[in-house]
Amino acid sequence: MLYLESTTLNSLRTLIESLGWPAAVASTRFIRRGGASVLLCLCIGWCGAALGGEGLKTLDEPRIVPGFELPGIDGRTYRLSDYQGSHVLVNFWAVWCTPCRREMPSLERLHRVLGGKRLQMISVHVGPSVEKAGEVAGEFGLSFPVIVDEEMTLTSWGVRGLPTSFLLDPDGRVIAQAIGDREWDSVDMVQAIRQLLVLLPEAGHLAMESAMIDALVGETNRFRVSEARRCSGS
């Protein structure tokens, strides 16, 4: 658990309040318990414009990361070892992180297009709680596993901001990463992921994927309009 000095706590609380986040997020107990993920989210909020939209950065050498055994919002226990033999996209996020929420619809569309045997996807919520993570996952209709790292045990993965995503090879090593939100279902991103997965598209498959993405983008746009109206109270 992260310990924060009182001066750091006060600074964090002031910044959180200035951003207009809920009072519960600014509480000392919440910041002490989730302080690391708050800091990560604030960091990516400040530099997200520079980091976002850069695609996936391929590592020069695959990097080994520790395994995990964490609860999912569905009540199941998930282990990284269960995915050995498959490529896995692991996305770190938090409920209060605006860039995280912004990329979720495109993550879901990517899962519908490439998910399954081609690509496994896991979403890791950083900090408490299972209930809050479940609410957001339901809001966006996420169909891939969402697990919760309440005690922030996966800091050794090298998460420098939220959202951060890692693409793992079938041996569980990181081969590419993205810091900041992305349009995961863009043509360039899907092509980049295909290349990393060494997937050769079958005849007519790209056209079918493009049609699926267009339809899913329409769904997302309608959802965004609905959310905007709800937030504005109209």
Image: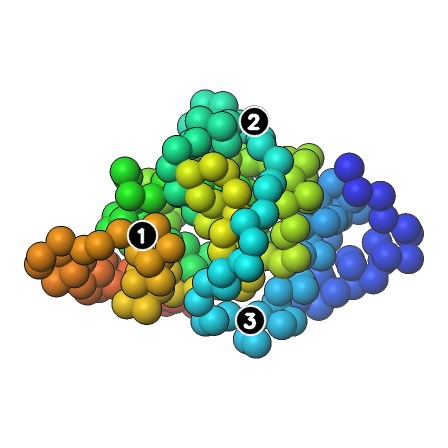
Q: Which quarter of the rendered picture does the C terminus lie within?
A: bottom left
Drawn side of residue 38 relative to residue 188, left or right:
right
Residue drawn at (37%, 55%), measured in percent from left and top?
196
| Front position among marks 1 and 2 | 1
Q: Which residue is mark 3?
A: 51
Q: Amino acid at mark 3?
A: Leu
Residue drawn at (91%, 52%), measured in percent from left and top?
6
Mark 3 in CB contact with mark 2 (< 8 angstroms)? no
How far apart are the alpha carbons under marks 1 and 3?
26 Å
- Dot 1: element: loop
Quarter of the view holding residue 103: bottom left
Residue closest to the eye, 194 or 144: 194
Q: Amino acid at mark 2?
A: Glu
**What colour scheme does the image use?**
rainbow
- Dot 2: element: strand
Q: Position of residue 62 (x, y in %)?
A: 54, 49
Q: Position of residue 106 (x, y in %)?
A: 35, 58
Q: On residue 198, which mark appears? A: 1
Residue 128 shows in this picture: no
Q: Amino acid at mark 1?
A: Val
Drawn side of residue 194 relative to residue 60, left or right:
left
Q: Which one is earlier in the sequence, the residue at label 3 or at label 2? A: 3
Residue closest to the eye, 206 or 225: 206
Q: Which residue is mark 2?
A: 69
Q: Position of residue 147 (x, y in %)?
A: 50, 35
How far apart are the alpha carbons under marks 3 and 2?
30 Å
Quarter of the view holding residue 137: top left
Residue drawn at (46%, 63%), measured in percent from left and top?
56
How crowded is the residue under tag 1: few (<14 C-alpha within 10 Å), some, or many (20+)?
few
Give the farthest residue toward the left.
204
